[in-house]
Image: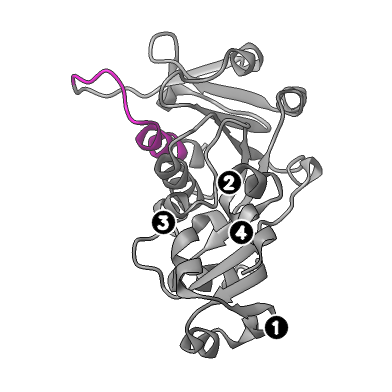
């Protein structure tokens, strides 16, 4: 494995900026291929892998086992690393979508994946992510989503791009104190459902453009729901509106 590719694989920020991610388990690789996602480079240390994934042979390169283990995200590597390029979406790809999900600073990849899994189950297939979010194609996010991250449209957006959506979309944020019970909420036209970070919630910039506050009523004596759990409830309620 040449030094240039090793430096890239070590630099998570550069990987994210270039829309690249690593796959190192057979199940996830099968999901990637089924979704039509491009595999740019394929490194392996066992010929049985290339026999199974013969379509990847043009991109395949045999390397030492320790090269695989150095960059694998799992403790027991499957004998390969696939360097994949995420689908590139534009803002215009989202302009005609009726319901968009905006994930604002969701830093836990497991929560990120779980939200997308629930959303996809209820027909929400368009996701905008602010720059503070975890990598959507990280191993933890992919596993938590049960592969749903490969079946939805995703784009990272700037603050200005987010604000531009407020011209055509109604933004909904959760507010346990001043929100309207979600069962009583009525929606018209295009909507953006916003889910904020686990620690600080929705950012002030997005609060400023969000005209609608909602909350989930529950009888139990708990302060709040985990963001992924709350998202699942909201997806269920909004899917019937």
Identify residue for label 1: 58
Q: Which span of residues is magenta-colored?
A: 221-235
Who comes first in sequence, dot 4 or dot 3? 4
Where 153 falls versus 161 (above or below)? below
Picture coordinates of residue 156, whole percent (x, y)? 67, 39
Residue that mark 3 sits on: 143
Q: Is residue 12 above or below residue 184?
A: below
Task: Let me know if residue 154 appears in the view.
Answer: no
Quick check: 4 left or right of 221? right
User: Do residues under tags 2 and 1 come within 8 Å of each other at their CB atoms?
Assistant: no
State whether residue 96 appears in this view: yes
Considering the whole magenta stretch, tell me its main secondary structure: helix
Q: Residue at x 57, y 68 (%)?
A: 82
Q: Which residue position is annotated with label 4?
A: 6
Q: Tell me the distance, in whole angstroms, between the alpha carbons under discs 1 and 4.
A: 20 Å
- Estimate the spatial distance between the alpha carbons at disc 2 and disc 1, rounded to whole Å: 25 Å
């Amino acid at each position: 494995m040449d030094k240039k590719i090793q430096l890239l694989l070590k630099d998570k920020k550069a990987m994210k900026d270039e829309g690249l991610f690593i796959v190192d388990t057979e199940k996830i690789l099968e999901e990637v291929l089924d979704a039509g996602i491009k595999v740019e480079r394929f490194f392996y240390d066992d010929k049985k892998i290339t026999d199974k994934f013969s379509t990847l042979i043009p991109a395949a390169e045999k390397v030492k086992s320790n090269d695989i283990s150095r960059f694998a995200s799992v403790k027991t590597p499957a004998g390969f690393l696939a360097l994949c390029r995420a689908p590139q979406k534009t803002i215009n790809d989202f302009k005609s979508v009726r319901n968009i999900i905006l994930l604002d600073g969701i830093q836990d990849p497991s929560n990120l994946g779980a939200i997308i899994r629930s959303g996809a189950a209820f027909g929400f297939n368009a996701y905008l992510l602010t720059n503070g979010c975890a990598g959507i194609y990280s191993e933890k996010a992919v596993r938590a989503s049960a592969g749903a991250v490969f079946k939805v449209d995703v784009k990272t957006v700037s603050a200005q791009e987010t604000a531009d959506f407020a011209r055509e979309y109604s933004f909904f944020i959760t507010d346990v104190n001043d929100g309207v019970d979600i069962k009583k909420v009525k929606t018209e036209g295009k909507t953006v459902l916003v889910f904020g970070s686990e620690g600080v919630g929705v950012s002030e910039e997005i609060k400023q453009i969000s005209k609608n506050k909602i909350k989930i009523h529950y009888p139990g004596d708990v302060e709040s729901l985990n963001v992924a759990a709350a998202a699942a409830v909201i997806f269920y309620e909004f899917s019937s509106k």
